[in-house]
Amino acid sequence: MPAANPTRNATLARAFGGRWALVTGASAGLGEQIALDLAAAGAHVVLTARRADRLNDLAERIRATYFVQTLVVPADLSLPEAPRELYDATEGAGIPIDILINNAGFGYLGQFHRGSPEWDRRMVTVNCAAVVHLTHLFLPRMIERRRGHIMMLASAAAFQPIPYMSTYAATKVFDRFLGEALDAEVRQYGIRVSSLCPGPTESEFGQVAGLNSSAFRRAVPAEPVVRRGLLDLANGRPISYPPGSGAFFIFLERFLPRTLVTRLLERGLRRAIPARNA
């Protein structure tokens, strides 16, 4: 469905209107909603993910609703050549990407020793290596133009080790730290980098991660999460805590022993593991 409110937000329109945005993982969930909200703000969008049929459907809806330009570039970011292919299809073809949304990623719930080494390797590639590669490719051109915005899709899991989601949480720490460091580096060039740190959000994440449906019963709709993330990106906030992120508990954890919090999480998450992953 189109964004809930197609009326342009003035802040988002000033920051993103008329610019080209590249949204990875745009075929569903947060990526789809980010693309819709950027289009509502007047941005032209490049949509990428593995599922070309979904991308084409989204592109048609965006063009019909918001009258902006769209470009569909299917790509699998677990493949090392994919970031360069995205760059060649955009900057290499004369389309200046001023908004890079590093959204693609996935997780897994289960005991580490029972998991697939290949699945974990692919997770690190998509969640971390592809983010680094894409940012390396697009950031220099933004610096040349003295304008740009980059969103890192981190997580509330980026503030604490998460038993049974150990690799996923580690990748999100990587994304958050990369985003915070880059924001400090590139502000002098007029570039803003923001790390969006959502908690459980209504998307396909839980299904892919193997979570029981009860684990996401308090999941927040994607719309308010994305709206907060884009507003914080437009306003130059390095960290974005959207609704449902548990910002108060993230703050509280600073004053508690990490080992204690980790053990409490282990007890809670152990019950959420599907039998096939336990």
Image: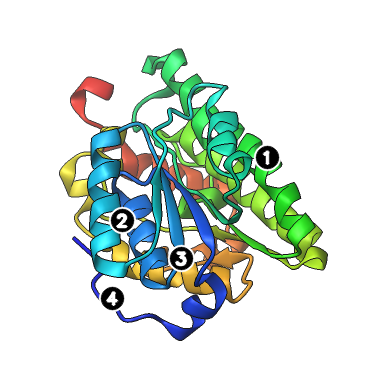
Along the polypeptide, which appears first: circle 3 or circle 2?
3
The amino acid beneath tag 3 is Ala
Mark 2, other Cα within 10 Å: few <14 / some 14–19 / many ≥20: many
Name the quadrant containing residue 190: bottom right
| Count of numbered circles on the image | 4
Going 59% across and 35% down the picture, which residue do you hit?
Answer: 88
Give the answer, above or below, for where 83 lies relative to 16.
Answer: above
Quarter of the C terminus within the rendering = top left
Mark 1, other Cα within 10 Å: few <14 / some 14–19 / many ≥20: some
| Mark 3 and mark 2: Cα distance apart in space | 24 Å
| Mark 3 and mark 4: Cα distance apart in space | 13 Å
Mark 3, other Cα within 10 Å: few <14 / some 14–19 / many ≥20: many
The residue indicated by pointer 3 is: 43
Q: Nearer the viewer, residue 251 or 60?
A: 60
Along the polypeptide, which appears first: circle 2 or circle 4?
4
Task: Give residue 201's mark.
Answer: 2
The residue indicated by pointer 1 is: 137
Task: Give residue 6's mark.
Answer: 4
The kind of secondary structure element at disc 2 is loop
The amino acid beneath tag 2 is Thr
The kind of secondary structure element at disc 4 is loop
